[in-house]
Image (spheres, grey):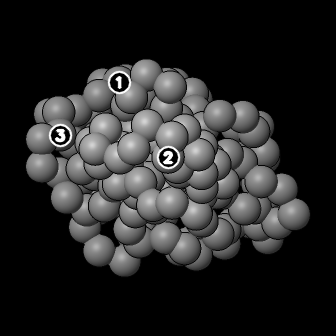
């Protein structure tokens, strides 16, 4: 607006200088917020990615966008001891119960589902499919490496969960 009020001979050099300063980041723009959450190309919030470290191997996980998954992510980094349960899943006791606000009544887990079993307050990571379970809330999905989790030995059961 102030450019329109200036003498015509000063508009072009001033406009060029402002454009150059904006381009190299020296002129502040309110649309460039460092605290804004990252967004994907479709304008949605970028998914939260974490990793499970088992020995010297890494298993990447993409968390779902729900209150229980966000509550789990707030606990990270976290070191837990996994146990095999029913030759179907690895389970671990969390330091506290997670929020279940807005969660479904249950889900049918698939191979690679990263879940929370609300009645017991534990993490459940499925390496085999299972039947519908009331109180089971999916937190996310293992991107790759389910076999690493499935083959984890008793010596590798204390694992680290951390943000990517």
**Mark 3–mark 1 contact, CB under 8 Å?**
no
First reached walking from the N terminus: tag 2 or tag 3: 2
**Mark 1–mark 2 contact, CB under 8 Å?**
no
**Mark 2–mark 3 contact, CB under 8 Å?**
no
Q: Secondary structure at mark 3?
A: loop
Q: Which residue is mark 2?
A: 10
Q: Which residue is mark 3?
A: 103
Residue at left 51%, top 40%? 9
Number of the front mark, 1 or 2: 2
Q: Outermost residue toward the right?
A: 56
Callout 2: 10 Å neighbours few (<14), some, many (20+)?
few
Callout 1: 10 Å neighbours few (<14), some, many (20+)?
some
One can see residue 106 in this view: yes
Is 159 situated left or right of 80 in this image?
A: right
Instruction: Locate the N terminus by quadrant.
Output: top left
Residue at left 57%, top 27%? 111
Residue 61 image offset from top left, x and y in percent: 59, 44
First reached walking from the N terminus: tag 1 or tag 2: 2
In this rendering, the count of numbered labels is 3
Q: Secondary structure at mark 2?
A: helix
Callout 3: 10 Å neighbours few (<14), some, many (20+)?
some
First reached walking from the N terminus: tag 3 or tag 1: 3
Give the alpha-carbon distance from disc 2 to disc 3, as whole Å.
Answer: 60 Å
Residue 119 image offset from top left, x and y in percent: 21, 54
Residue at left 17%, top 33%? 104
Residue 38 image offset from top left, x and y in percent: 47, 46
Q: Which residue is mark 1?
A: 108
């Amino acid at each position: 607006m102030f450019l329109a009020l200036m003498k015509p001979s000063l508009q072009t050099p001033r406009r060029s200088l402002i454009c150059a300063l904006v381009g190299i980041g020296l002129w502040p723009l309110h649309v460039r917020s460092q605290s804004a959450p990252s967004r994907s190309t479709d304008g949605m919030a970028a998914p939260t990615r974490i990793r499970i470290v088992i020995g010297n191997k890494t298993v990447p996980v993409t968390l779902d966008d729900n209150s229980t998954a966000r509550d789990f992510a707030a606990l990270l980094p976290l070191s837990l001891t996994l146990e095999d349960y029913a030759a179907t899943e690895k389970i671990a006791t969390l330091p506290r119960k997670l929020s279940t606000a807005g969660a479904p009544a249950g889900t049918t887990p698939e191979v690679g589902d990263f879940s929370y079993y609300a009645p017991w307050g534990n993490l459940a990571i499925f390496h085999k499919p299972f039947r519908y379970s009331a109180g089971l809330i999916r937190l996310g999905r293992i991107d790759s490496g389910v076999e690493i989790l499935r083959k984890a030995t008793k010596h590798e059961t204390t694992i680290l969960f951390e943000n990517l």
